[in-house]
């Protein structure tokens, strides 16, 4: 039976990824986020929660929690870093390629872990839009989240 | 501090082993097939390695056939014996927790018309002997069970299995993958009634690229690769003489003071296990405790964190370990071994395996016990999964 094989470099982490894994940015729980979203599932090996603070459609702060590998943690750091200061519309236009480039290239076999951070951001934005559509900008913290 | 605790994956070549090998690359480079002196020198060196290795498992020198490693030995034993005995039957029995070098071979044989039963194991990884008894039928030609499970260190009841097979009305060959047990747990091919057994050099401080198949005299076997096969081997191609010499020397070193080495590893193992259980909460041990566990294996899941992150943080602190996390594999599925003992995927993803060698020391265990709790604590702090979630 023919079998697939590939280059070893497809599993290699860049220096940027290792550095962000070692000292992740924006990691931790956020008090009173405007919106929070969870993607993934521990049974599949990775899960991410993202918190956004949004002021007049501008993302003023972003944080995340990760149950995942180095690619997942580094991407979480990078995505939250990129979106800070951006408007919702701008943040939505960020591509996974841009995130990957900022990380010195994601190993191809780890793309699924990286995509998770990206998907969590999209989900958070989507939820924010839904919230806004329902009741204009909410003044209270997102439901179901404990502070601190 | 550098601490290497992945000796179940591969080991450092011992200095004595390298010294023994070196002349066989340069001055003593002959091909063992010819009778001129350079050739004979190589042939003698192979014979010497056969002698040393055979003695360590109570076999005869001619019953040791060198291969490129345990993987090739497993393939040669299973396919070779299956093909050679096809007229007697087409049924093979193995277990769900074998190494892929056994499982993938069995799956290929199924495509070729063989029937394979994969035995269950209990939550500690022990093979169910009643199920083995009940699985045997008149078509059964081969049983393959690993001696020590490479992931969780369970020592399988090989002697009991050998006894069950000895009591059958017809001949059933018994293959044992001993890659994880050789030089860690005593092996006696006579007492255990083993017909074929795979071992590997690079797991006992020998070089990579060499292993051996113990094959009891008169066991029918067919080659699985073709080319010129000499009277003294079962595979084509020039023998890797320097590596074989290294394997012999590595076995000599491992079995010189075998019991002392085993006791040393067992003490380190228990020091590490006790420390982990004392210092870290929400841990799950994989495999048994005590005498039925390999003296060289420790394997715990740290709940609510992911294994690869633990592995990399330990690496940043100079500690090398292995993980059962799927994130580092082709298929992204958790370990088949942990799945077979009933470990839930979310827990299997946090499995970390520490494997010891006789060269490890107590201070290294203490260093791990200093670093590991901090790594787990920090990762739990940033995990969205909180205690009690599973």
Image (tube, grey):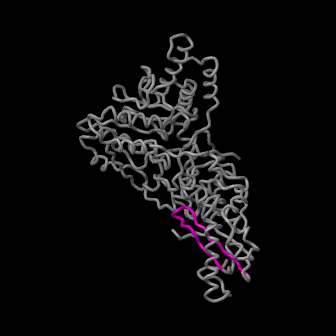
Dominant SS in magenta: strand
Most foreground residue, B107 or B121:
B107
**Percent coordinates x, y for residue B212 in the rendering:** 47, 31
Question: Vertical placement of B217 versus B69: above or below?
Answer: above
Task: Judge left or right: residue B352 versus residue A21.
Answer: left
- Look at the image and say whether residue A44 sits in the magenta stretch: yes
Task: Judge left or right: residue A118 versus residue B86.
Answer: right
Most foreground residue, B202 or B107:
B107
Most foreground residue, B269 or B109:
B109
Q: Can residue A25 be seen in this view?
A: yes
Task: Quadrant for residue B17, please give it.
Answer: top right
Task: Judge left or right: residue B176 versus residue B371.
Answer: left
- Look at the image and say whether residue B149 sits in the magenta stretch: no
Question: Vertical placement of B203 versus B377: above or below?
Answer: above
What segment is highlighted magenta in the picture? A35-54
Question: Vertical placement of A47 versus B211: above or below?
Answer: below
**Percent coordinates x, y for residue B237 in the rendering:** 50, 25
Q: Is residue B64 visible?
A: no
Number of numbered callouts drawn: 0
**Percent coordinates x, y for residue A10 in the rendering:** 62, 50
**Percent coordinates x, y for residue A5 in the rendering:** 55, 45
Farthest top residue?
Answer: B36
Question: Vertical placement of A56 versus B114: above or below?
Answer: below
Q: Which residue is drawn at 55% across and 36% down?
A: B204
């Amino acid at each position: 039976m023919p079998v697939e094989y590939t280059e070893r470099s497809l599993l290699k982490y860049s220096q940027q990824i290792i550095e962000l894994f070692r000292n992740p940015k924006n990691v931790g729980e956020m008090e009173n986020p405007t919106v929070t979203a969870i993607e993934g599932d521990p049974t599949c090996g990775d899960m991410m929660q993202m918190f956004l603070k949004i002021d007049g459609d501008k993302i003023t702060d972003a944080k995340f929690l990760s149950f995942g590998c180095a690619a997942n943690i580094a991407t979480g750091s990078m995505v939250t870093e990129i979106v800070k200061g951006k408007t919702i519309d701008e943040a939505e236009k960020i591509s996974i390629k841009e995130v990957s480039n900022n990380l010195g290239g994601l190993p191809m076999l780890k793309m699924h872990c990286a995509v998770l951070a990206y998907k969590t951001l999209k989900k958070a934005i989507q939820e924010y839009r839904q919230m806004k559509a329902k009741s204009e900008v909410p003044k209270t913290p997102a439901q179901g989240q404990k502070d601190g | 501090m550098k601490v290497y605790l992945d000796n179940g994956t591969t080991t450092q070549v011992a200095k004595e082993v390298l010294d023994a090998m070196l002349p066989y690359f340069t001055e003593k480079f002959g091909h063992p097939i010819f009778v001129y002196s350079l050739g004979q020198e190589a042939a003698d060196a192979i014979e010497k390695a056969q002698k040393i290795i055979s003695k360590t498992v109570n076999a005869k020198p001619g019953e040791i056939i060198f291969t490129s490693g345990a993987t090739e030995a497993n393939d040669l034993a299973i396919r070779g014996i299956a093909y050679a005995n096809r007229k007697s039957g087409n049924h093979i029995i193995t277990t769900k927790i074998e190494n892929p070098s056994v499982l993938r071979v069995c799956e290929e044989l199924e495509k070729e018309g063989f029937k394979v039963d994969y035995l269950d194991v209990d939550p500690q990884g022990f093979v169910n002997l009643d199920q083995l008894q009940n699985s045997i039928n008149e078509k059964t030609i081969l049983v393959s069970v690993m001696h020590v499970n490479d992931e969780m260190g369970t020592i399988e009841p090989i002697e009991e299995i050998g006894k069950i097979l000895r009591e059958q009305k017809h001949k059933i060959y018994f293959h044992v993958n001993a890659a994880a047990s050789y030089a860690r747990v005593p092996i006696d091919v006579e007492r255990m009634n083993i017909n074929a057994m795979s071992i590997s050099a690079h797991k006992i401080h020998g070089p990579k690229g060499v292993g051996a198949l113990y094959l009891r005299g008169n066991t029918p076997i067919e080659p699985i690769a073709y080319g010129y096969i000499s009277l003294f081997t079962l595979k084509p191609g020039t023998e890797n003489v320097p590596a074989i010499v290294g394997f012999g020397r590595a076995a000599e070193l491992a079995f010189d003071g075998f019991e002392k080495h085993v006791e040393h590893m067992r003490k380190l193992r228990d020091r590490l296990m006790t420390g982990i259980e004392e210092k870290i909460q929400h841990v799950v041990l994989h495999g048994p405790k005590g005498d039925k566990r390999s003296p060289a294996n420790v394997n715990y899941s740290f709940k609510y964190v992911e294994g690869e992150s633990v592995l990399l943080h330990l690496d940043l602190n100079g500690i090398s370990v292995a993980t059962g996390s799927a994130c580092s594999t082709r298929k992204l599925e958790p370990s088949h071994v942990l799945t077979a003992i009933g470990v839930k995927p979310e827990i299997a993803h946090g499995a970390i395996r520490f494997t010891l060698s006789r060269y490890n020391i107590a201070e290294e265990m203490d260093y791990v016990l200093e670093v590991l709790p901090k790594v787990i604590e920090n990762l739990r702090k940033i995990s969205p999964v909180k205690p009690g979630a599973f």
